Amino acid sequence: MNVLVIGRGGREHALAWKLGQDGHEVFVAPGNLNMDGVTCVPIEETDVSALVGFAKREGIDWTIVGPESALMAGVVDTFQAEGQHIFGPTKAAALLEGSKAFAKEVMREANIPTAGYDTFTDAESALRHIDQSEAPLVVKADGLAAGKGVTVAFTLEEAREAIHDIFGTDKFGDQSRVVIEEFLDGEEFSLMAFVSGEHVIPMITSQDHKRAFDGDKGPNTGGMGAYSPMPHLDNAVYAEAVERVLFPLARTMVERGTPFEGFLYAGLILTADGPKVIEFNARFGDPETEVILPNLASPLLDVIEAVVDQKPYPIEWVEGYTIGVVVAAEGYPDRATTGQVLSGFGDLRDDVLVFHAGTTRDGADIVGNGGRLFVLTSTKPTLLEAKHAVYTALEQLDLPKTFYRRDIGGRALAHIF
């Protein structure tokens, strides 16, 4: 088939790679010049009319949406109105990610386990609430914030600073609401699924590493690495999350008149009371996509078509583990350094994959032009082998003015050994 992937980052590179592996002709809009084997189309993710026009002209059979910005621009609504096959939620359903407060309302209605919370529309009332609370607290910008609008405040002063950043600066964009939650203690994990209406096909688990530096230190980021699946997560916990989170969410969205179709991401934390939801995303996670898709043995479009047609599908997964490490520019997640030349990729062994994100080309050189530059992954029979392959490959590259975590997968390996 002819398939269009909307987006430009590592997640979209991984989607395009998987679709290419499955034998499809792949277009990516706008894509990245370092994505091999695909046709990049110079159309921005939010230029909805140009995207649907391209899909019609080129006879695109399926369009797959990567980033949340395109979803909130209503790309799915427009494609559907024009009779074009597209996999992703409508703008109304994408509010699960577009508004933390909306997601909390849906969770409450669906009786999905999550942290207690309050919502505020001005700094003064939020600060009064903080003054009457005890730390730690979790402060969340209500709208889209590129995965960085969450502050785990271990002191009340940190919580107050987060309120200032949300209402008093443009650090997280134009925000009009804030959600303040109780702090949940436990190990975090990601659970994603293919969803269409009430039909849900769960994926294997993964674990993201949000903090910038080793040992979970430093600021929150869009994700510094991930691995999949989680060998130490009990099957009973997985089943409980599927039954108490994924299915109730899908059912409630249908009942509300905003059925969800697309990749559903549930960010979970395993507490003493069982798994609870930290957040929902209305698209494939990043960098989780880059470690889940190499483990997917089934053709991606076969799974998508099955869920859309409300048919069961026995997904086949690779017997093994994938680890992915994000290489980021110095200064990320605040002011990232750009223009550095990254080299050595041509000498890498074929047992690693590189999914480009914040890079571009300057002649023959690969050059950094963003925060998270690329994700390097490897799939092996054991997690330890995968980790060794990834970090060995990273040491072979010349990566000036960059950094990466050296402990991705460490939590799982600590459980195993």
Image (cartoon, helix red, strand yellow):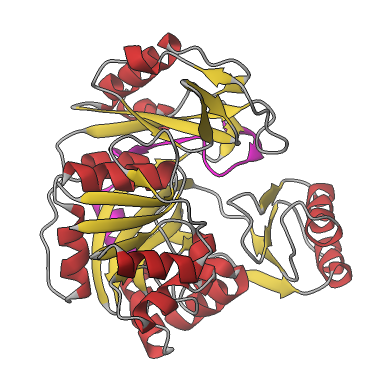
The quadrant of the image that shows the C terminus is top left
Residue 124 versus residue 134: which sits nearer the camera? 124
* Magenta residue check for 8: no
* Magenta residue check for 235: yes
Residue drawn at x 12%, y 49% is: 316
Q: Position of residue 21 (x, y in %)?
A: 18, 41
Q: Position of residue 413 (x, y in %)?
A: 35, 26
Residue drawn at x 45%, y 46% is: 286
Q: Is residue 39 above or below residue 391?
A: below
Residue 320 versus residue 131: which sits nearer the camera? 320
Residue 261 versus residue 52: which sits nearer the camera? 52
- How many labels sit on residues? 0
Q: Position of residue 173 (x, y in %)?
A: 72, 58
The quadrant of the image that shows the N terminus is bottom left
Residue 215 visible? The answer is: no
Q: Position of residue 134 (x, y in %)?
A: 76, 57
Residue 234 versus residue 337: which sits nearer the camera? 337
The answer to whether 339 appears left or right of 87 in the picture is right
Location of residue 275 by image quarter: bottom left
The answer to whether 177 appears left or right of 72 in the picture is right
Residue drawn at x 37%, y 37% is: 35
Q: Is residue 393 above or below residue 58?
A: above
Residue 267 visible? The answer is: yes
Region rendered in magenta: 216-244
